[in-house]
Amino acid sequence: MFLHFPILKASCHCSEKDISKPLHIPGLPPMVSLDFPGPCRDRNDMAYQYLLESSPEMSSSAGVIINIFYTLEHRALDAVKKGECRPGKQIPTFCVGPLVSSNDGVNGAEECQTWLDCQPTGSAVFLCFGSMGVFPEQQLKAVATGLETSGRIFL
């Protein structure tokens, strides 16, 4: 999304928060502006300007290191690698995840992977909110309730 950000801006002369139709970003399903992180919706926000200025820097880098694994985000990763997010800018991506840490200083990734590997194919829901995964209490409770009532196992 951030690599494609300048193209989104050029395609519309209003703030993203004022766009009601779904927006198409290579490698992602159509998104409405409410799906965007807050600063990406308002052109008057200083963070918006920073993201807009940093996007070309990302596309001129030697590559992007991402805490993800290819199978989970292959469409988005392929779009970045093929230069679809920034036409003519093929950007190498390096998947290094999932990286999981615990408070006791022991990396829990191996334990999580072992547990997932023991589950029947397609039976587990994997949620990863990343380091920026901060939600209002009501939203977190809604996610927890949805997981609990889904009847599916989850990590």
Image (cartoon, rainbow, N blue to C red):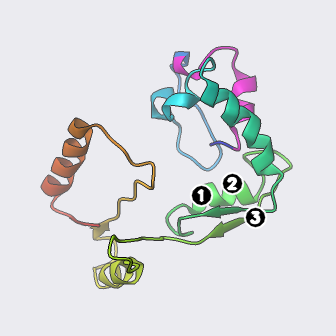
Q: Tag 3's secondary structure?
A: loop
Which label sits in the foreground, 1 or 3?
3
Residue 123 at x, y = what percent?
A: 28, 71
Residue 133 at x, y = what percent?
A: 40, 49
| Viewer-nearest residue: 59 or 87 | 59
Q: Residues within 10 Å of mark 1 (few under 14, many from 20)?
A: some
Q: Main secondary structure of the magenta part?
A: helix
Residue 24 at x, y = what percent?
A: 61, 36
- Cα–Cα span, label 2 and label 1: 6 Å
Q: How many marks?
A: 3
Work out which quarter of the rendered image holds the C terminus and state it: bottom left
| Viewer-nearest residue: 41 or 46 | 46
The amino acid pointed to by label 1 is Arg
Residues shaded magenta = 3-17
The amino acid pointed to by label 2 is Ala
Q: Choose top left, top right, bottom left or bottom right for residue 46.
A: top right
Q: Tag 2's secondary structure?
A: helix
- Cα–Cα span, label 2 and label 3: 11 Å
Q: Residues within 10 Å of mark 3 (few under 14, many from 20)?
A: some
Q: Mark 3 or mark 2, which is nearer the start of the sequence?
A: 2
Q: Tag 1's secondary structure?
A: helix
Magenta stretch: residue 15 in it? yes
Magenta stretch: residue 65 in it? no
- Which residue is labeled 2 in the image? 79
Dots 2 and 1: beta carbons under 8 Å?
Answer: yes
- Which residue is labeled 1 in the image? 75
Work out which quarter of the rendered image holds the N terminus and state it: top right
- Which residue is labeled 3 in the image? 92
Please indicate whether residue 107 sits to the left or right of residue 32 in the image: left
Residue occupying image coordinates x 64% and y 14%: 14
